[in-house]
Amino acid sequence: MDWVYVVIGLVILLLAGDSLVKGAVNMSLRLGVPALIVSLTIVAFGTSAPELLISIEAIWDGVPGLALGNVVGSNTANVLLVLGIPALMATMHTSECDTRVSYLQMLAATVLFIVLCFIGPLNWVSGVILLAALAAMLVHAAMSANKHRKQSASDTADDCDEEELEGADPNLGWGKILLFLALGLIGLPLGASLLVDGSVNIARHYEIPETVIGLTLIAIGTSLPELATTVMAALRRQADVALGNVIGSNMFNLLGIMGIASFVGTIPVESEFLSFDLWVMLGASLLLIPFVFLKVDITRLWGIILSALYVAYLLLVLV
C-alpha cells in the first residue's frame, strides 16, 4: 500500500499544483497585477508548492533529511533531467536567451546555500538569510523588467521575455478561478502527506535512509511538472525558454523553499550531503555555463550527456 500512496500522492500533487497555478495566475491578472509580478511570485510559489509542502510535512514527521534531499535532488534533476530529456527530442535554442544575470544569481544562491549547510544545521537564522536573498533577487528582477519595458518600442525584445504566462485564460470566470484555487489548496497538503508517509515507510522497510528517498524518488516526482512543460515546449520547437525556467526554479527552491522550511524546524545536514550531494548540485549548475555565456544550443548530443550524467548520479546514490 505504501507504493500506492506514493503514486496517488504524486498524481494529486501534480494536479493540485497545476490547479493552484492556473487559479492564482488568472485571479491576479483579473485584479490587474502585472504578468511579470505574477510570474516572479505566484507562479514560482505555485509550481514549487509540492516541494514546499513535502519539506514542511517531512520536518513535522521528524524526517528533515527527506526535506533537504528533496530540494538538492530536485535542483540536480532540473539541470540534468529536465533539460536532458527534452533535448533528446529536439534541439533547444538556448542561444537565443540572455539569462546571464539570472544564472549568476542562481550560482550565488547555490554557493550561499552550501556555505550555510557547512555552518549548519539550517535554522531560523539561515531562513532569514535565504529569504532576504530571495527578496533582493525578486526586487532586482522587477526593476530590470520595468526598465526593459520602458525602452523604445522599436527595440527588439529578448525571446525569453516574450514567453506567454502559462495558465492565463482571459475568458476564465470567477467561479472557475475560485474552484481551481480551492482544488489546489486542498490537494497539495493531501498529496504531500500521502507521498511523505508512503516514502518514509518504504525507506524504513528496506532500510534506505530518508535522505536517499528524498534525493531520488521524491526529487524526480516533484520535478515532473517542469519536465512535462519542457517536453511539450521541445515538441513544439519552443524550448528556447527552458533554460530560464530551470534557473528560476532552482533559485526559488534554494532560497524560498529552504528559507521557509528552516522556520518550521531545524534541519541537520548529514555528512553525505557535505561531501557529495551538494557538490553534485553545484557541478550540475556549472554545466550550464556553455549554454548561458557561450551561446551554445542544447542539442541531442547534450541531451544524451545530461541524461547519462543523471543516471550515473542515481546509481551512485542508490548503490
Image (spheres, helix red, strand yellow):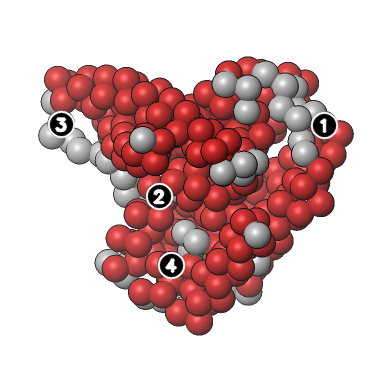
Q: Residue at x 61, y 68 (%)?
A: 312
Give the percent coordinates (x, y) of residue 188: 38, 27
Residue kind at label 1, given as amino acid type: Gly
Residue at image position (40%, 23%) is 189
Residue situated furthest right in the rendering: 119
Residue 315: tell me if it is visible: yes
* Residue in the foreground of this view, choosing between 3 and 66: 3
Q: Position of residue 299 (x, y in %)?
A: 47, 78
Label 3 SS:
loop
Q: Which of marks 1 and 2 is nearer the N terminus?
A: 1
Q: Which of marks 2 and 4 is nearer the N terminus?
A: 4
Mark 1 falls on what kind of element? loop
Density class for disc 1 (Cα within 10 Å; few <14, some 14-19, many ≥20) is: some
> Residue 229's quadrant in the figure?
bottom left
Which residue, given by chain and number where applicable, does mark 4 sit on?
85
Residue matched to label 1:
120
Q: How far apart are marks 1 and 2 (CA)?
A: 30 Å
Q: Distance between the residues labelled 4 and 3?
A: 33 Å
Taking 166 as reference, is 236 above or below it? below
Residue neighbourhood size for the residue with mark 3, other residues' Cα within 10 Å, grouped as few (<14), some (14–19), many (≥20): some
The residue carrying mark 3 is: 172
**Residue where numbered disc 2 is placed:** 224
Marks 2 and 4, how far apart in space? 12 Å
